[in-house]
């Protein structure tokens, strides 16, 4: 029901914003499967460009998946215990530490990459190994995992649960695996999906850290935008959308679920 | 009855402390090796030119850097206000109205959250590039993707979802009775917006604005893809480092950029308690 | 102002019928309470009167004979006190109270005079320049009332205005609120789920259940002559006496009781305060539990009727659990009501 002009104005702004965000997305999807973008969709639909992307960039796609999974493993191993320790030790030191590891959220990736390059760039073996890119990704995604787990841990009465388990004779390690991890699962899941989504899309750090033999998906995208015809670039973008959109939707679902617990 | 439990907990507390330290260990090693030391190296590297620490003064004295800094700030300010205006309008509309298709609109508006800056740049090329939609639809030569307008639109593209989510989260917490109370007191809708909604959203708007500004300041991928004619700070850092091999200046500019964005997000967090990733 | 409601119904988008067609007449200066459990439609009815919800087509709302059905909320000139008070946190007490007057674009001097007047009436002099966040619950309630009353509305609507307060404060503020509303001399409608509140404040109470008004009347009338089992239970906690009625006699597990009239096919109810412990009473019961409540004892009795009965005992020597006692109930204290399907 449009009661007033105000409502109408609000609706128009909302629709205009949607169009601004969605029209180019649609264009790139269409251009990726159109035989000749100049002549429009009437030139016929084809999977030729997608096939070409696969030939040219399958390696980058697999490298990105590999790095994303390794990044997930690293953030789980580093982030979950750290989130637990931070939640159990609330205090000034913990806040400072949390603030410090969150720096990569605020400091642009370019600056972080420069810092890493200057310290480790001369170590040739490390510099040219895919784990150098991985380090950048873990740096960037770790705060998301830590915060996601911490917010769930803050919502449950962790201390009392643990004291209960301790009074029944459970050791700290057992309590971590029997009490902490199961109760933090919604946060871990939301954090994990965020980490994978962000790692697959990461460009700013990766562009500086990559070598010609190690191109991730977004690096390949930048490459195709600069040197390939529009249809190939679009087809590659389409492939990226197909990977990232389900991840984004799953991430939003998991975050909303974790948030319901914290309220 | 209680004494044995207390004693028992006391003993466990010792191992508990050790276990907590063990939990911190991976984080400590990783953060030290790949965050603290590299950042320290970056700061030191900025002083390793002939100018020494005075390099920071040089940024302000060199017209090229100064104008870059100014342009970056101007574009970022413009993007911040545009994103705030659009996202607040859309966010309030989506929170206060339920209608078929609402969730589709919401998905569309948050989709670009997962797009890297390069993809956003490509989206703008598809809209305003030489083969872009606008150039095809309108007669005449409408190419704006590589101008400051293209950069502005690109930054706006990734700022809208971030601001929208912050605003909507805050708007959902506003008691609907506040608006109804103003209505029963005879307030027209523009007064309700001014007197009730905007004051209630104030801290969220400051936080979202700071996030949008910091993100725009540090955005690299979009500017890189658009290969814009105007210089923004991240592009200058990139060219100083890769083309001119002026490592000290690239480091100094990075430090300045990092400090600005970090300080802004700190402000944002003190207002809202949440942080949306700065990326793009 | 006289309020006339004709054929007010509300069906929500999902098909839920929140309110069945309802008629109601409220006289000038009268304070009426809408009383009922949550989900009975009382708040919906209040919001329709305010203009915050629209009724289903066919409804008519008249303020002093003027049809306001199509008028939007901002031009109906009603004052409303919300359950959460909905005070504007970005304004002071004075700013909140003056807001409605500012919307009427009154001259500054008049706004000041009228705010001062209401502030005095509500005893808020000490707090006028304070921010809302610094006020206690009771003070907030008075500011909300003052804000709603300051623009001189035609009708004052209050939605559970006491439910945000803790129990001890609630009783005190209930009496204060009743006094203030009387002093205002305004027609008011007051929604509550608490029968004590309704009885203490209202001239007339409309008991609502399942989207309709079950009965409307003065508190005494509702208490003494409920029309339905629901009203009897909700107002004054009447307990069912489950047994068999033949002519004017009620047969229960523990004995038989005379009724004041023949009531076959009806259900019998009694209130705890009407059950007397009498050595020669016609009902036999066993004491299950005794709770000391200060002014009296509350005694749980089994064996008299099918379900446990509660009686109030004001004497000094209360029976003990396990004792066998005899009970009497005056025929006029037994309410015989038509069988209520929703309750039975």
Image (spheres, helix red, strand yellow):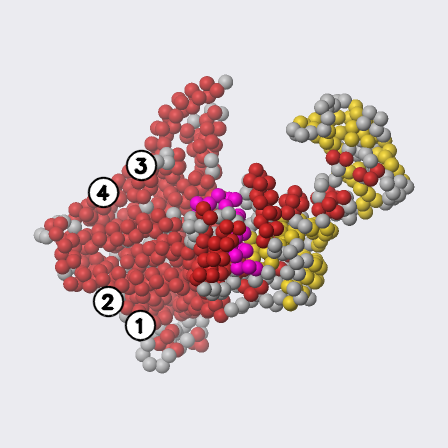
Residue beneath disc 1? B144
Q: Are marks 1 and 2 on the same chain?
A: yes
Residue B158 makes an appearance in the image:
no
- Chain to which the residue tagged by mark 4 belongs: B
Distance between mark 2 and mark 4 Cα atoms: 34 Å
Q: Are marks 2 and 3 on the same chain?
A: no
Count of marks placed on residues: 4
Compared to residue B78, the image places residue C269 above or below, namely: above
Distance between mark 2 and mark 3 Cα atoms: 43 Å
Secondary structure found at label 2:
loop
Residue A240 % position (x, y):
39, 59
Query: Dividing the image into 4 quarters, which one contains the N terminus of chain C?
Result: bottom right
Which is more foreground, mark 4 or mark 3? 3
**CB-based contact (under 8 Å), mark 4 and mark 3:** no
Label 1 vs 4, first from the N-terminus: 4
Distance between mark 1 and mark 3 Cα atoms: 49 Å
- Chain to which the residue tagged by mark 2 belongs: B
Please tell me how crowded label 3 is: few (under 14), some (14-19), or many (20+) other residues with Cα within 10 Å: few
Q: Nearer the viewer, residue A59 or C338?
A: C338
Which is more foreground, mark 2 or mark 3? 3
Residue beneath disc 3? A93
Residue A135 % position (x, y):
29, 46
Q: Nearer the viewer, residue C90 or B116?
A: C90
Residue beneath disc 2? B230
- Chain to which the residue tagged by mark 1 belongs: B
Distance between mark 4 and mark 3 Cα atoms: 19 Å
Please tell me how crowded label 1 is: few (under 14), some (14-19), or many (20+) other residues with Cα within 10 Å: many
Q: Which range of residues does the magenta coloring cover?
A: C132-153
């Amino acid at each position: 029901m449009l009661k007033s002009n105000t409502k109408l104005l609000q609706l128009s702004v909302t629709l205009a914003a949607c169009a601004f965000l969605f029209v180019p997305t649609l264009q790139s999807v269409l251009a990726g499967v159109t035989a000749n973008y100049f002549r429009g969709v009437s030139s016929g639909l084809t999977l030729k460009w997608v096939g070409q992307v696969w030939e040219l960039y399958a390696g980058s796609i697999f490298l990105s998946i590999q790095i994303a999974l390794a990044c997930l493993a690293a953030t789980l191993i580093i982030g979950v215990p750290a989130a637990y320790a931070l939640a159990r030790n609330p205090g000034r030191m913990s806040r400072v530490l949390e603030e410090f590891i969150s720096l990569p959220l605020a400091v642009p990736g370019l600056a972080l990459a420069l810092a890493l390059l200057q310290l480790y760039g001369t170590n040739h073996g490390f510099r040219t190994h895919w784990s150098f890119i991985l380090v950048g990704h873990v740096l960037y995604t770790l705060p998301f995992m830590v915060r996601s787990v911490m917010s769930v841990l803050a919502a449950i009465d962790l201390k009392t649960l643990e004291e209960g388990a301790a009074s029944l004779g459970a050791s700290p390690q057992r309590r971590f695996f029997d009490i902490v991890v199961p109760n933090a699962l919604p946060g871990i899941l939301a954090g994990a999906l965020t980490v994978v989504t962000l790692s697959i899309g990461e460009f700013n750090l990766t562009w500086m850290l990559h070598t010609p033999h190690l191109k991730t998906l977004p690096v390949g995208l930048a490459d195709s935008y600069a040197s390939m015809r529009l249809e190939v670039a679009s087809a590659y973008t389409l492939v990226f959308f197909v990977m990232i959109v389900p991840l984004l939707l799953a991430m939003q679902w998991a975050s909303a679920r974790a948030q319901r617990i914290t309220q | 009855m209680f004494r044995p439990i207390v004693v028992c907990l006391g003993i466990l507390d010792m191992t508990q402390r050790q276990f907590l330290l063990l939990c911190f260990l991976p984080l400590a090693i990783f953060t030290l090796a790949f965050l603290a030391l590299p950042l320290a190296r970056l700061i030191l590297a900025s002083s390793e030119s002939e100018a020494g620490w005075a390099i920071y003064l040089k940024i302000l004295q060199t017209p090229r850097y100064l104008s870059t800094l100014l342009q970056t700030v101007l574009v970022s300010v413009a993007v911040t206000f545009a994103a705030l205006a659009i996202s607040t309008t859309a966010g309030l509309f989506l929170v206060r109205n339920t209608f078929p298709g609402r969730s589709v609109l919401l998905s569309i508006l948050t989709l670009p959250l997962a797009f890297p800056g390069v993809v956003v740049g490509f989206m703008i090329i598809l809209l305003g590039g030489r083969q872009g939609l606008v150039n095809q639809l309108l007669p005449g030569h409408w190419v704006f993707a590589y101008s400051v307008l293209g950069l502005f639109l690109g930054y706006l593209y990734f700022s809208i979802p971030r601001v929208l989510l912050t605003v909507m989260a805050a708007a959902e917490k506003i008691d609907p009775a506040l608006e109804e109370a103003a209505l029963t007191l005879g307030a027209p809708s523009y007064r309700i917006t001014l007197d009730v909604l905007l004051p209630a959203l104030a801290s969220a708007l400051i936080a979202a604005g700071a996030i949008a500004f910091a993100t725009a300041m540090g955005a690299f991928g979009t500017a890189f893809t658009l290969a814009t004619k105007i210089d923004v700070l991240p592009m200058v850092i990139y060219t100083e480092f890769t083309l001119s091999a002026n490592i000290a200046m690239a480091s100094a500019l990075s430090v300045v950029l990092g400090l600005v964005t970090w300080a802004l997000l700190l402000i944002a967090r003190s207002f809202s308690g949440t942080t949306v990733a700065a990326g793009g | 102002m006289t309020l006339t409601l004709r054929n007010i119904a509300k069906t929500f988008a999902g098909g839920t019928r929140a309110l069945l067609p309802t008629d109601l007449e409220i006289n000038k200066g009268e304070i009426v309470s809408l009383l009922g459990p949550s989900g009975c439609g009382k708040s919906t009815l209040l919001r329709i009167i305010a203009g915050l919800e629209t009724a289903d087509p066919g409804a008519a709302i008249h303020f002093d004979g003027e049809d306001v059905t199509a008028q939007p909320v901002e031009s109906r000139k009603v004052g409303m006190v919300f359950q959460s008070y909905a005070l504007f946190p970005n304004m002071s007490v004075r700013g909140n109270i003056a807001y409605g007057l500012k919307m009427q674009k009154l001259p500054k001097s008049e706004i000041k005079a009228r705010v001062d007047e209401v502030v005095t009436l509500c005893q808020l002099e000490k707090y006028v320049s304070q921010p809302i966040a610094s006020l206690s619950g009771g003070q907030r309630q008075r500011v909300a009332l003052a804000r709603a009353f300051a623009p001189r509305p035609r009708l004052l609507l209050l939605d559970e205005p006491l439910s945000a307060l803790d129990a001890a404060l609630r009783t005190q503020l209930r009496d204060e609120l009743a006094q203030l509303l009387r002093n205002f001399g305004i027609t008011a409608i007051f929604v509550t789920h608490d029968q004590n509140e309704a009885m203490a404040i209202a001239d007339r109470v409309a008991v609502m259940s399942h989207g309709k008004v079950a009965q409307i009347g003065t508190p005494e009338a509702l208490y003494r002559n409920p029309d339905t089992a629901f009203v009897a239970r909700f107002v004054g906690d009447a307990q069912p006496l489950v047994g068999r009625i033949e002519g004017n006699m009620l047969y229960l597990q523990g004995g038989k009781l005379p009724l004041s009239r023949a009531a076959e096919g009806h259900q019998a109810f009694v209130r705890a305060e009407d059950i007397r412990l009498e050595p020669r009473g016609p009902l036999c019961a066993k004491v299950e539990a005794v709770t000391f409540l200060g002014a009296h004892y509350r005694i749980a009795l089994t064996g008299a009727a099918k379900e446990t009965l509660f009686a109030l005992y004001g004497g000094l020597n209360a029976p003990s659990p396990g004792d066998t006692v005899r009970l009497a109930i005056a025929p006029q204290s037994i309410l015989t009501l038509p069988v209520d399907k929703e309750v039975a």
